[in-house]
Image (cartoon, rainbow, N blue to C red):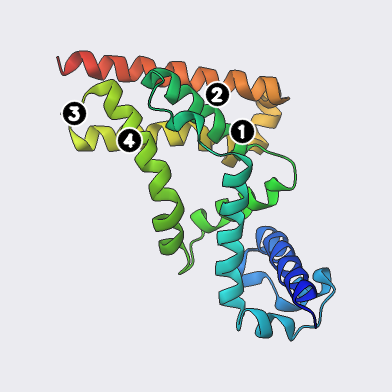
Amino acid sequence: MTEASTELTFDRLLQKAVEVFAEHGFRDATVREICTRANVNIASVNYYFRSKEALYVKALAFAFHEVNRRYPQNAAMNANLPPEHRLALFIDNFLQRLLDDSSVGFHSKLIAREITDPTKALDEIIATTIVPQCALLKEIIELILGPETDRELVNRCILSIFGQCVMFKHSRSVIDRLYPELIADEAAVQNSAEHIAHFSLAALSHFAKLSE
């Protein structure tokens, strides 16, 4: 087997593993189904990854990598922009990635599954991917509220902002039935992101005044 074909097999297994794990979850997904979709011998998982558990960890890391590659937070990291603008950019990026219906949707679905029904892989994912996202949002919030702001307040603000965005993901079936116009297309999602940003900035402004 050539190096090129080995790499192709490895990548194909990862891609199909993301799909199967996203659809069934870690516990109900089978190595046989992953290999069938990848059109490879079932022994390939043991050869390339050693176990289903190791394949899952790699698939989860791959899912985060692909989402971050498609939706980098570079704009929100720009320290030359006002923090209010950075917050709006962060929220827009985060909501767009959550509601992406393209192939990235499998990656987002797998990530959502892991967060709601965690495995041993979650600790590593938190350290390598979620912590940097929280750190960026924390930096932006502290610029708005001031560096001396109570840490618990900052952390609650972080979770409140993430919560508003994640609501659109985890309650999408309800939103599709009650308020479909809010996520009907890319422009609608952007408008919803702007609303979350305005709503959050109003709350942050309130907390900033209380600390004066």
Mark 4 → mark 3, Cα distance in angstroms: 11 Å
Q: Position of residue 94 (x, y in %)?
A: 54, 35
- Residue under label 4, please give it: 138
Up the image or down, 73 lies above or below 121; here it is above
Instruction: Give, as a three-letter code, the residue at label 4.
Output: Lys
Mark 4 → mark 2, Cα distance in angstroms: 18 Å
Are the residues at dot 4 and dot 2 in contact (C-beta closer than 8 Å)? no
Labels 4 and 1: the sequence-earlier one: 1
- Residue at image x 44%, y 36%? 162
Up the image or down, 2 lies above or below 109; here it is below
Are the residues at dot 1 and dot 2 in contact (C-beta closer than 8 Å)? yes
Instruction: Give, as a three-letter code, the residue at label 3.
Output: Thr
Instruction: Give, as a three-letter code, the residue at label 2.
Output: Ala
- Residue at image x 18%, y 28%? 149
- Residue under label 2, please give it: 193
Image-quadrant location for residue 151: top left
Labels 4 and 3: the sequence-earlier one: 4
- Residue under label 3, please give it: 149
User: Which label belongs to residue 96?
Assistant: 1
